[in-house]
Amino acid sequence: MRHIGLVLGLAAAVAAIGSGDAAAKGNTAKPPAELLVSVSRGPATGLDGLRAFANEIKPGAGMMISDTMIDSSIAPMIGATSLAGLDRASASYLLYVDGNGVKGLAYVGKVADDTAFTNAVGQAFVVKKNGWAVFGAKPVVDKVSAYALSTLVAQPNVTAPVATAYVPNVLARYKAQIAVMRTQALAGLTSDGVATEFKTKYVDGILSTLGQTDQLTFAFDASKDGSEFDIALRPKAGSTLAKFVAAQKPSDYALVNQLPDLAAPMLIAGHLEAGPYRQDLLQMVGVAGSMPKEVIDLYKTVLQASSGDAALVMGFAKGKGMSMTGVFAMTNPKAADAAIARIMGLLAKGLTMTTMGMTQTLTAVAGPTVHDGVTVRGYDTTMDLSKAPPAMRASSQLINPSGTARSELAVVDKLYLVAMGSDADAQIGRAIDIAHGKGVRAAMPKPLAAMLASSQARKDSGAMMFDFAALAALTGTPAKMTGQVLMTFGVVDRAAHFRVRMPSSMFKQFTP
C-alpha cells in the first residue's frame, strides 16, 4: 500500500513515446484496472487557503506555495516541458497507473491555448476530446484516456486537492504485499497482551472494510484558522459497508446538554447505528478476553435497548486518574435496568476476568443507593498489572493510580447514566438531577458550541473533541500541543466521511 505514495512524490521522469492527437477509446464506465490513484487539483485560487495557513504558522512561508511551483514539479513526471496552455480556472488531474506491464503518470487538463499547450507537451503523447487533453507516455495514456475524458472530467470541480484511490484496483495490484503487511501487523501486536483472536479480527476487519470499498478519497483544505482533512469511503453497492452507511442518521447532539460537566478535555457525542455490524461488535467484545457469558449478555442487552444516541465526557486529573460521565438514550430502559441488576448480582462476590491482556476484578458495591428516587448501582474495578507489559502497566497506572476505580450506573426515564472515577457518586447524582430538570446544566463553552453547530449543519452523525492543552494541564505535563481538535463522522452522497479539524495554533510549536 505504501506504493500509493508514489503519486504524490514520484520524481522519476516518464519516458515520452509518440506525439499528436488521438481519439479516446475503450470502456468509460469505470476506472481501468491499471488506474490506482488520481489526484484532483482545484483552480489556482484553491491554494489561497493553504498559503494563509502557512503564513499564520510562519510569516512568509506562504511564498513557497504557488501554482507555478507545482506545475514545474509535475511536468517532468509526464514527459512535458511545462503545463502551459491549460485552463487553471478548471480542475486538473494527475493519474498514477501500475499494472499489466504499464507503469507511470498521465495528466488531464482543460486546454485554454492550443498553441501554448502544443509547445509545452513536447514529445508527450496526447489524446483530446471536447477541449480536454490527456498527456504523458503513450502506454499510460492509452490505458486511462477513455475513462479520464468521459467520467473523470464530468465530476464537479474541486476547490482543494483530493486524492482518490480506486481500492479494488489497489488491492488486486498489491495483493501479495498486503498479505505480507497483514502478517507483519499481527506480529507487531504480540507484545501488547491482546488475545490473538481479537487481533486477527481487528486487522481482518480493516481489510474486509477495504474489500467492500470502491473508492477511498483524501481531501485537504486549509485557512488562516486551521486545516482540515476528510477521509471518505465510498462502499460497493449491496455490501455490508453500504448497508452500514445507509443506516446512519444525522445527530442533533441534544444529549450533550444532559451532561453535568463540559469542562473535561475530551467529549464524544452523536448517533451511531451498528446496523449490519451489531453482531460483529458483540463478537469482538466476546473474544477480547475471558469475559463470562453474563457480561457479554449485558453488553448485548444494553446495545439492543439503545437508540444509538450518546454523549460522554472524559477527563484526567493528576493523582486521581481518569473520570468519565456518559448519557445514553434508551428505547427499552426497563430491559437496560434489569440487565444492570442482573450483572450486579453476578458481581456480588467479585468476578475476575482478563481483558485486553489485563486481569481485573469487578466487585459490586454493597447495596444500591437511591438519589431523588432513582436506584444507583455501583461496582469497583481492581486491576492486577503484575503480568502486564511495561507500557500497558504505565498507561494503566496513569488512568487508575490507586488500582481501583469506582463506576456508578443508573437508568432515568429513557436515559442510561454512567459515571466513573474518584467522584463517580457526585457525578451520577448531578446527572440524575439534570435528567429530572432540577440540576444546573453545564454552560456550553463557545468553541465547543461552534464546533458542534458546524458539525450539525453538515448533518454529521458523530463528533469527538480533544483539548490537548487541557489534557496537558490535568496530567501535569508540558503542553506540547495546544488547541481543540474536532473529529466528525458523517454520511454524504452515500459515502462515509471521517473529518479532522486542527487549529493553526497546534502547528506553531513545530516552527523553528
Image (spheres, rainbow, N blue to C red):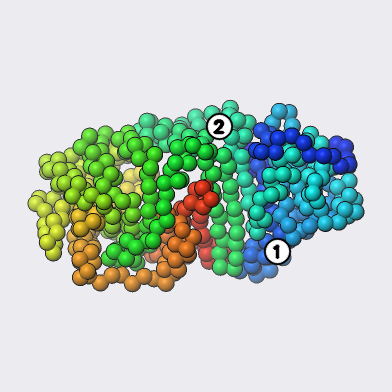
Q: Is residue 389 visible?
A: no
Q: On the rendered image, what quadrant is the N terminus found in?
A: top right
Residue depicted at x 53% and y 45%: 233
The local crowd at label 2, few if under 14, some if 14 to 19, many if 20 or more residues have their Cα within 10 Å, is some
Residue 45 got which mark?
1
Q: Is residue 90 above or below residue 356?
A: below
Viewer-nearest of labels 2 and 1?
1
Residue depicted at x 45% and y 68%: 450
* Image spot of residue 52 (x, y percent): 64, 67
* Image spot of residue 436 (x, y percent): 20, 66
Label 2: which secondary element = helix
Query: Three-letter amino acid code at disc 1?
Result: Thr
User: Residue 228 appears in which quarter of the rendering?
Assistant: bottom right
Q: Is residue 385 above or below residue 454?
A: above
User: Residue 282 appears in which quarter of the rendering?
Assistant: top left
Q: Going by the image, does 496 lie left or right of 131?
A: left
Residue 246 got which mark?
none
Q: Going by the image, does 431 lie left or right of 399?
A: left
Q: Going by the image, does 394 lie left or right of 169?
A: left
Q: Which residue sits furthest left?
A: 367
Query: Three-letter amino acid code at disc 2?
Result: Ile
Count of residue discs? 2
Q: Is residue 495 visible?
A: yes
Pointer 2: what residue? 178
User: Residue 303 appears in which quarter of the rendering?
Assistant: top left
* Image spot of residue 39 (x, y percent): 67, 48
Along the polypeptide, which appears first: circle 2 or circle 1? 1
Of residues 340 and 473, the one drawn nearer to the viewer in this rendering = 340
Q: Are marks 2 and 1 in contact (CB under 8 Å)?
A: no
Q: Going by the image, does 51 lie left or right of 458?
A: right
